[in-house]
Amino acid sequence: VPASEHPLYAKFFKMLKVGIPPHVVKAKMGQEGLDPTIIDRPGDERVPLEEKKPPEAAAKESVPASEHPLYAKFFKMLKVGIPPHVVKAKMGQEGLDPTIIDRPGDERVPLEEKKPPEAAAKESVPASEHP
């Protein structure tokens, strides 16, 4: 498939076409985990439709902390004015690492966040059934 028509890269070639500077486009490609050198190639150069990633690369994918599926709602809570100690307590209740919200929202964290073993071992029971 021509690079400029590739499903992953077409939008970046369009960004260049409308006048966005190449360094900005490359930075955006890097954020999305794509090879930024693709836009240095001619748009009609053929690239494989499916890129093969090594298994360890797939496991190391990361996203900004504020966009992580597990943490995004907690960054939103901070944004609307909920005090950090309350947000951290809620994160602890859900078995998540509360120190994540101390980091900048754009800091990258692994997409596959592992819960601490003690959180997985805890059993939840309704308060009415608690001994």
Image (tube, rainbow, N blue to C red):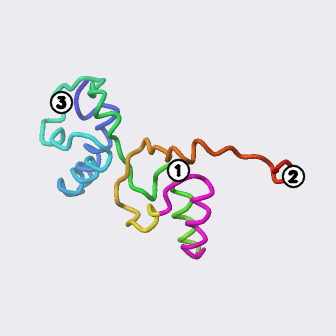
- Which label lies toward us, 1 or 2? 2
- Which residue corresponds to the image point at 15% horizontal and 41% vertical from the top-left? 37
Using the numbered discs, state the Cα–Cα distance from disc 1 to disc 2 in whole angstroms: 28 Å
- Which residue corresponds to the image point at 44% horizontal and 45% vertical from the top-left? 113
Q: Earlier in the sequence, mark 3 or mark 1?
A: 3
Range drawn in magenta: 81-98
In percent of width and height, residue 78 lies at 54, 70
- Which residue corresponds to the image point at 27% horizontal and 47% vertical from the top-left? 29
Residue highlighted by disc 1: 70
In percent of width and height, residue 121 lies at 59, 42
In percent of width and height, residue 38 lies at 18, 38
Viewer-side residue, 115 vs 9? 115
Residue highlighted by disc 2: 128
Q: Earlier in the sequence, mark 1 or mark 2?
A: 1
- Tell me which amino acid carries mark 3: Asp
Q: Secondary structure at mark 3?
A: loop
Determine which of the numbered discs, if any, sits on residue 44 in the image.
3
Instruction: Answer few, some or many: residues within 10 Å of disc 1's Cα (few below 14, many 20 plus, some between 14 and 19).
Output: some
